[in-house]
Image (spheres, grey):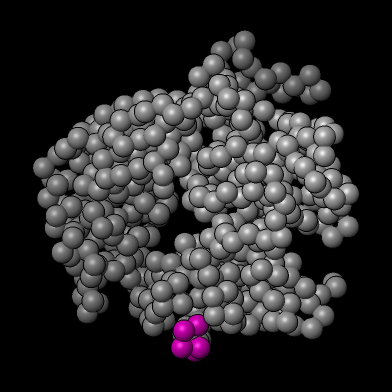
């Protein structure tokens, strides 16, 4: 399921426990809101983790092979020497004992949803054995997965499924879209929260536009759109199509290779849909307006371009469409713009709208619209641009020159300035408010934390990885690593 805002995709650590004492869970959640903020997992000299307060004084009388930070609801992952997972509350009591099960949670308002999963081998009936006709072996088993999703506070089971992993059957997970404080979509179902209970409202919800609270379901192979304000109100029913015929200066042009993707798509999130009542063609991502199929007074150059169009995008909340024709010589799209009346335009204003490729790089706007070539080092060209998550004006720019290694920088398109010049091997933004980044430079063996706002290096220690919550991994020998938490703002390491 894809969440659509101003971004268009061309083509998806939390806690979890099972049923437990209702009152005990609520007490733990309340207590942690006051205490968990100062409970830090520290790596001791013996190689085990222990929870301490801000003064590094132990607050839980237990040690673990590994331990996570506490969630806002008051639970933490812990692991034993065999890396079996368990869950504890702020007093160190086990909510889930160590086991080979995996847990995840999703905090949803007053409730926490929990996913519990386990994989195991199971002997198949003889008619399902995999006979190897080229060899002597017979595979009599398959890998199965059991997944259960429930409410942490009450133990209410929401969904469960057992599947044969090797059959590539679709499973269930905590991948959800929250519509408001009382409604969410998960595993193609719409749910309502009433008090401490979760109630299913509708199924076969395959696509959501959460900003506008639009839900998309399926019926007889068509996509059915609903406006949602606590109730589902049908607005239109659309048929998926793969090609359209347009009229250009009175002549027909068939566009039959539109918006192709490597991924299999359902009718409900197809790239082109036709209204079964009006026959209007509605392009992705929000299918909010009809694409013009008649163009007049076109130049030969415009007609030639239309013949090569393979991408049509509807720009959200505007009367514009973006047309793309792939330029194989430069290995990028060439773009033109039209409005709902079929007028060709020189340019459009859509500053928060992006078309992304399969690996998240920006295809539109063209790189020159984000950064002028005058800001790029002489001889280098922009190879890829990636938008920093949840930030309109911050971009990681990758540049390249001939066969030399690529270089990356952090760019602010609003101020038209480099926050970090394109001199890095890699950049990972950990905190965009204080501009804390994880940098790799040149041939250095590892990366370090850098305060881009104050332009100063935070850590002298080099790390293999650092996550936004401060979990860091460091190489301490040819074949040995060490992992522990650090403060990403100061570089303080929580280890003895």
Q: Position of residue 175 (x, y in %)?
A: 43, 42
Instruction: In the rendered view, tell whether residue 328 sits above or below residue 120.
Output: below
Question: Which residue sits at x=39%, y=34%?
Answer: 227
Asked if residue 202 lies in the magenta stretch, the reply is no
Q: Is residue 108 above or below residue 361?
A: above
What residue is at 12 percent from the left and 50 percent from the top? Answer: 27
Q: Residue at coordinates 24% horizontally, 67% vertically from top-left?
A: 37
Q: Quadrant of the C terminus?
A: bottom left
Residue 109, above or below 370: above
The answer to which of 460 and 203 lies nearer the viewer is: 203
Please give the range of residues in magenta.
452-456
Query: Residue 375 falls in which quadrant of the image?
Result: bottom right
Q: In the image shown, does 161 or 138 lie closer to the viewer?
A: 161
78 left or right, relative to 256:
left
The answer to which of 145 and 173 lies nearer the viewer is 173
- Residue 11: x and y in percent read 65, 43
């Amino acid at each position: 399921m894809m969440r659509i805002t101003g971004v268009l995709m061309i083509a998806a650590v939390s806690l979890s426990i099972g049923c437990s004492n209702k009152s005990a869970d609520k007490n733990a959640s309340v207590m942690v809101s006051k205490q968990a903020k100062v409970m830090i997992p520290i790596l001791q000299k013996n190689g085990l983790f222990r929870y301490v307060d801000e003064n590094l004084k132990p607050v839980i009388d237990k040690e673990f092979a590994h331990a996570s930070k506490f969630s806002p609801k008051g639970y933490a992952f812990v692991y034993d020497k065999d890396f079996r997972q368990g869950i504890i509350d702020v007093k160190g009591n086990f909510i889930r004992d160590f086991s080979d099960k995996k847990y995840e949670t999703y905090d949803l308002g007053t409730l926490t949803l929990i996913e519990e999963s386990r994989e195991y081998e199971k002997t198949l009936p003889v008619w399902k054995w995999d006979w190897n006709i080229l060899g002597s072996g017979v595979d009599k088993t398959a890998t199965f997965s059991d997944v259960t999703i429930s409410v942490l506070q009450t133990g209410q089971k929401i969904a469960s499924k057992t599947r044969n992993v090797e059959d590539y059957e679709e499973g269930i997970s905590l991948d959800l879209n929250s519509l408001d404080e009382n409604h969410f979509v998960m595993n193609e179902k719409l749910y309502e929260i009433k008090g401490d209970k979760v109630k299913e409202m509708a199924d076969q919800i395959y696509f959501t536009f959460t900003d506008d609270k639009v839900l998309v379901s399926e019926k007889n192979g068509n996509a059915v759109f609903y406006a949602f304000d606590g109730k589902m109100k049908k607005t239109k029913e659309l048929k998926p199509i793969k090609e359209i015929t347009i009229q250009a200066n009175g002549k027909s042009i068939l566009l039959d290779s539109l918006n192709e993707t490597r991924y299999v798509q359902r009718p409900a999130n197809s790239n082109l849909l036709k209204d079964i009542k009006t026959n209007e063609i509605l392009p992705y991502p929000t299918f909010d307006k009809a694409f013009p199929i008649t163009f007049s007074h076109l130049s030969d150059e415009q007609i030639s371009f239309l013949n090569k169009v393979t991408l049509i995008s509807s720009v959200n909340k505007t009367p514009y469409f973006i047309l793309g024709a792939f330029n194989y010589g430069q290995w990028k799209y060439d773009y033109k713009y039209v409005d709902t009346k079929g007028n060709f335009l020189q340019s459009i204003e859509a500053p928060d709208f992006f078309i992304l490729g399969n690996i998240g790089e920006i295809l539109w706007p063209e790189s020159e619209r984000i950064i002028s070539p005058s800001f790029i080092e002489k001889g280098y060209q922009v190879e890829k641009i990636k938008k920093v998550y949840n930030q309109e004006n911050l971009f990681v720019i990758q540049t390249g020159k001939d066969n030399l290694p690529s270089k990356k920088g952090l760019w602010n398109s609003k101020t038209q300035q480099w926050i970090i010049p394109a001199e890095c091997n890699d950049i990972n933004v950990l905190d965009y408010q204080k501009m804390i980044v994880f940098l790799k430079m040149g041939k250095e063996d590892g990366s370090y934390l850098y305060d881009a706002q104050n332009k100063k290096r935070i850590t002298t220690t080099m790390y293999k990885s650092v996550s936004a919550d401060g979990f860091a991994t460091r190489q301490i020998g040819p074949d040995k690593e060490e992992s522990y938490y650090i403060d990403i703002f100061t570089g303080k390491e929580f280890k003895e």
